[in-house]
Every structure is written in structure tokens, then in C-alpha cells.
Image: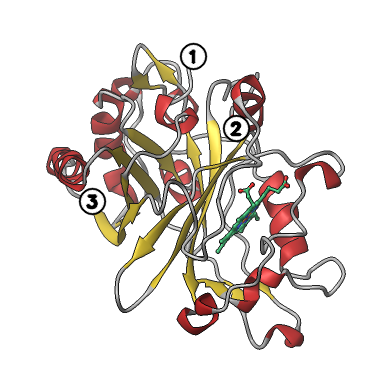
Amino acid sequence: MTPQPAILLPPLAVGQVLTLRLTAAQQAKPLLRVFAALAMDESLVVGFGWHFVQAVSGNVPGLRGFPAMTLPESAGGAAVPATQADVWVYVRAAEAGAALDRVLALMRSLPGGLTIVEDVATFTYRGGRDLSGYEDGTENPQGVAGAAAAIIADGPLAGGSFVAVQRWVHDQSALASAPATAPVKRTAQESFGPPAFMLRRSMPYGGAREQGLYFVAYGADLDRFERMMRRMAGQDDGVVDALFRFSRPATGGYYWCPALTDGKLDLAPMVGAGGVEAMPDVAV
Ligand code: HEM
């Protein structure tokens, strides 16, 4: 079992992120046939939400829906919304055309049954900075430590990963006068017990009207992200992270990114050892 290679690789010049929702539970099984046959390379990450897993009576311990949070009133009505969907696809590429080709090829191969909830083009900004100007990802655990943070080490999900994703919308006026110190003060990974190491692969997105950060964090479990998010959102002690002064999350989802066997998604936790063909028809 090996991890999906694109998880461990840094972002390229562009990314394209799709969030998809099942139109009906019966569609899950034919879709899994296609996903099981997909050639997974360094340009693609695929993750499944809990509802998809449930629709095929799969068992992915630790996967759950994204938790919405309400911030203290001092945060001016900001909230951490949950917009959980069923499939998450991240494409990384050296140029936008290649990313789009990959996305369209994938969409054409699907038999239907998924609607596009969100389609976000992301890009590298000034060599890996957030649009606020801060270099993003420098505190990521490196090499073996990065893999240990992001990839499930043992058990039936070994080689797989969980991902927490959020699209953050920056406040343009606040961006112009961004504070001189890095915004995130309350997320030092070592300051959590146990330490909450994760592998962040966030990228800026947007244009003239709206812009922000597409936040992506891989972890061997979802608890580490959730503990950090709770602290940032003032759920522990009422103190909200300074980040909320210039940015707000608009979306939030949790997905499970299966390991690979022979370059293909290992869907055994969803379909059983017999593979997709041996699955019983999905009862709805
Ligand atoms: C608009 C959204 C965000 C922006 C612009 C942002 C930006 C940054 C920047 C500039 C750093 C310092 C450099 C680095 O290590 O990357 C950082 C660190 C970090 N951020 Fe974020 N961040 C955002 C959201 C989040 C969220 C939602 C989480 C998790 C819930 C998070 C977790 C972390 C962690 C774990 C670190 C490393 C801290 C350390 O170990 O010292 N960030 N972020």
C-alpha cells in the first residue's frame, strides 16, 4: 500500500479543486468502478466524504462530517461553516491547460451521478506565498516526518490519509494593510497535546472580485485539524485567531484519500476484499 503520490508532493504552478456531490446513493457503486480503474499519478488526489462511504455500506473509521463552529460574538459574526460534499478531487499541474485537461478527462469518464458543487482554480503566488504576502507552508514537517503526519501508518486504512479543506475568502481592504507578523499564532503544532502535525498544501485562488486561500491539510487523522481549528475559532478559551481579522472560511469538508495498490485506488474499506465487482447492489 502506498500513499497517493500527489499528497506528499508540493504544489506546482497551478491546481484545480473539484468538490462533487452524489445525486443519489444508487450512483455510488457504478462510480466506484470508475474510481477503482483510475490511473493515479503525481497530478491527482481523490478523496471520499462520509456520505459516499455510507452509501456503499463501507467502513472508514475516523471519517466523519466537517463540524460547523460558531465563533464568539467578539469575532463579529464570523463562523466556520460546514459544506461537506461526497467526492473531492485535487489536480496539480505545471500549467492551467494541463490541469483542465486532467479534470475534463476525469469528468468524461464518470458515468453520471455526481454534480459539481465547487470548481476552484488555484495558483502559486510569488513562489509559495499566501495573497497576504506571508510565506505559507514553511513550518510543514519535512520528508519522513511529513509522511508520518499525513499518512495513516497501520490498520485497514494504512497508506491512506484524511484531508481537511476550507476555502478562505480574504478581505481585500484588510489585505492592503496586512499585519507585519504572520497571522497564525495559535497553531504551533508542538503546542498541542499530543502534537498536531499536519501537511498543509494550501494554494491561493481568485481574481479581481474575490480572492483567498484554498486551505488543504492532510493528516493521519482528522482530530489534529479539528483541535487546531477549534482553538483558532475560540472554542477553547474564547480567543479567536488574528487570521479572522482579514479572512473568513466560506466552505469546509473532510475527505478520506485511500491508499494505492498497483497505482490504483485501494477501495477495499468501501467495497470489501472482493473488489467492486463482488459488491452487493446498493440498497437504498
Ligand atoms: C486564510 C487562511 C490561512 C492562512 C492565510 C494561513 C497562513 C499561515 C502562515 C503564513 C503560516 C506560517 C508559515 C507556515 O508554516 O506555513 C501558517 C502556519 C500554520 N498554519 Fe495557517 N493559515 C491559514 C489557515 C489555517 C488553518 C485553518 C489551519 C488549521 C486549522 C492552519 C494551520 C497552520 C499550522 C499548523 C501552521 C504551522 C504552525 C507551526 O507549527 O508553527 N492554518 N499559516
Report the residue at 47% width, 72% height from top. Answer: 169
* Residue at which label 3 appears: 113
N-term-proximal mark, 1 vs 2:
1
Report the residue at 46% width, 41% height from top. Answer: 53
Q: Is residue 195 above or below residue 247?
A: above
Q: Nearer the viewer, mark 2 or mark 3?
A: 2
N-term-proximal mark, 1 vs 3:
1
Helix, strand or loop at label 3? It is loop
N-term-proximal mark, 2 vs 3:
3
Q: Which mark is residue 1?
A: 1
Q: Is residue 185 above or below residue 96?
A: below
Helix, strand or loop at label 2? It is helix
Position of residue 89 in the picture relative to residue 138 (left or right) = left
Helix, strand or loop at label 1? It is loop
* Residue at which label 2 appears: 150
Classed neighbour count for the residue bearing mark 1: other residues with Cα under 10 Å, few (<14), some (14–19), many (≥20):
some
Of 146 and 236, the residue lying toward us: 146
Q: Is residue 19 visible?
A: no
Tag 1: amino acid: Met
Tag 3: amino acid: Gly
> Percent x, y for residue 196?
75, 42
Q: Is residue 135 visible?
A: yes
Tag 2: amino acid: Ala
Mark pair 2, 3: CA separation: 30 Å
* CB of mark 1 near ligand 1 (< 8 Å): no
